[in-house]
């Protein structure tokens, strides 16, 4: 327990302390984006996933170090290093996207941005290498209990097909829902805590990964909450997807993982209706509230929220976080008591 508590503290403090320095570096390096839902359209540093990655890796290495030197090591050390490898790969991919800055301004349904990210079709391909560390050590169990489908043994196809599909899928669907100060980070805190708490309840040692990730996000949200001082960028959303998939596969928690990602899966199908051309952003009004950018057409969960009632950016972020919280509570209950 001492090792876990120290690791959580290290993760939180590392992110909290390192973020201001990285913010200055990112801004000086021109790694910036426009905060779209503000009247003044401030230019902020982006690629906040780097800050969170530092915190998570510092926490995991602290945990490995303490357990190795003071408690004789642990069986999960290899798995934790595999997770660190996946985190580094996926964060690097996100940074490539965040670094892909163009001086050309692009129009995004009444809003302008100075950043041009990687083409949508290339992003899934670039996130694929993050699955390699998980594949090469045959991590996880080929027999899975899935919601509504029951128990299925996938055999070798689990590692060669489902693991890479899981990494690519989770990283990219999480990347689709956001654009509001604190929403990506806040939702991440919720599902990381949900996975960590569930793992603790079931005596699963992978809980340390999710709780370390949650503490790193809590350290980051101090700078990303409304009004944000730094934007998360693709480096954060890709990172969160990799952490979730790595942890649920190693911990055999796929059922809860699928349930927790339901809002993002719904977002995927809504975006699919627009051919992945629609943005989650709203149209800023003079009173600071946001109108749906496509009228009554719903291409995102955020459009649904704005159609129900025009809200401020902060209110929409809180609504998304509370939605994820509701999904998490129901998901833990259903999975823990074996309803699914």
Image (cartoon, grey):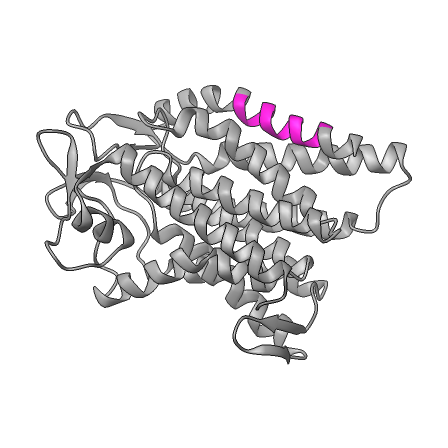
Quadrant where the N terminus sits is top right
State whether residue 253 is above or below residue 243.
Answer: below
Instruction: Examine the structure image and report whether residue 154 is included in the region drawn in magenta.
Output: no
Q: 279 left or right of 52?
A: left
Give the residues in magenta: 6-16
Q: Position of residue 147 (x, y in %)?
A: 54, 70
Q: Residue at x 67, y 78 (%)?
A: 156
Location of residue 124 (image quadrant): bottom left
State whether residue 62 is above or below residue 166.
Answer: above
Q: Position of residue 180 (x, y in %)?
A: 30, 38
Quadrant where the C terminus sits is bottom right
Q: Residue at x 50, y 51 (%)?
A: 328
Q: Main secondary structure of the magenta part?
A: helix
User: Which is more toward the observer, 324 or 127?
Assistant: 324
Location of residue 98 (image quadrant): top left
State whether residue 212 is above or below residue 153.
Answer: above
Q: Position of residue 252 (x, y in %)?
A: 67, 62
* Residue 129 visible in rendering: no
């Amino acid at each position: 327990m001492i090792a876990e508590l120290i690791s959580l503290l290290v993760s939180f403090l590392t992110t909290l302390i390192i973020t201001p320095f990285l913010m200055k570096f990112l801004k000086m390096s021109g790694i910036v984006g426009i905060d779209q839902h503000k009247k003044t359209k401030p230019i902020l540093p982006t690629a906040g996933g780097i800050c969170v990655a530092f915190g998570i890796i510092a926490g995991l290495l602290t945990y490995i170090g303490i357990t190795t030197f003071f408690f004789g090591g642990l069986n999960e050390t290899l798995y934790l290093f595999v997770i660190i490898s996946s985190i580094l790969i996926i964060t690097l991919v996100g940074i490539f996207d965040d670094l892909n800055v163009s001086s050309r301004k692009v129009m995004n349904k009444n809003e302008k941005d100075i950043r041009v990210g990687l083409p949508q079709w290339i992003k899934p391909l670039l996130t694929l290498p993050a699955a390699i560390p998980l594949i090469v050590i045959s991590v996880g169990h080929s027999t899975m209990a899935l919601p509504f489908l029951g128990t299925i043994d996938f055999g070798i196809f689990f590692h060669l097909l489902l693991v890479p599909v899981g990494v690519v899928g989770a990283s990219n669907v999480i990347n689709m829902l956001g654009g509001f100060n604190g929403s990506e980070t806040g939702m991440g805190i919720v599902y990381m805590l949900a996975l960590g708490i569930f793992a603790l309840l079931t005596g699963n040692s992978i809980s340390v990964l999710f709780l370390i990730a949650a503490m790193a996000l809590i350290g980051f949200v101090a700078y990303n909450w409304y009004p944000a001082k730094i934007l998360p960028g693709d480096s954060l959303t890709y990172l969160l997807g990799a952490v979730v998939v790595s942890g649920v596969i190693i911990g055999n928690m796929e059922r809860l993982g699928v349930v927790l990602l339901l809002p993002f899966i719904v977002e995927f199908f809504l975006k699919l209706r627009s051919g992945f051309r629609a943005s989650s952003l709203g149209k800023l009004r003079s009173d600071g509230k946001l109108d749906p950018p496509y009228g009554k057409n719903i291409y995102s969960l955020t459009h649904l929220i704005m159609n129900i009632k025009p809200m401020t950016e902060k209110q929409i972020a809180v609504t998304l976080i509370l939605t994820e919280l509701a999904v998490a509570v129901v998901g833990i209950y259903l999975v823990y008591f074996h309803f699914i």
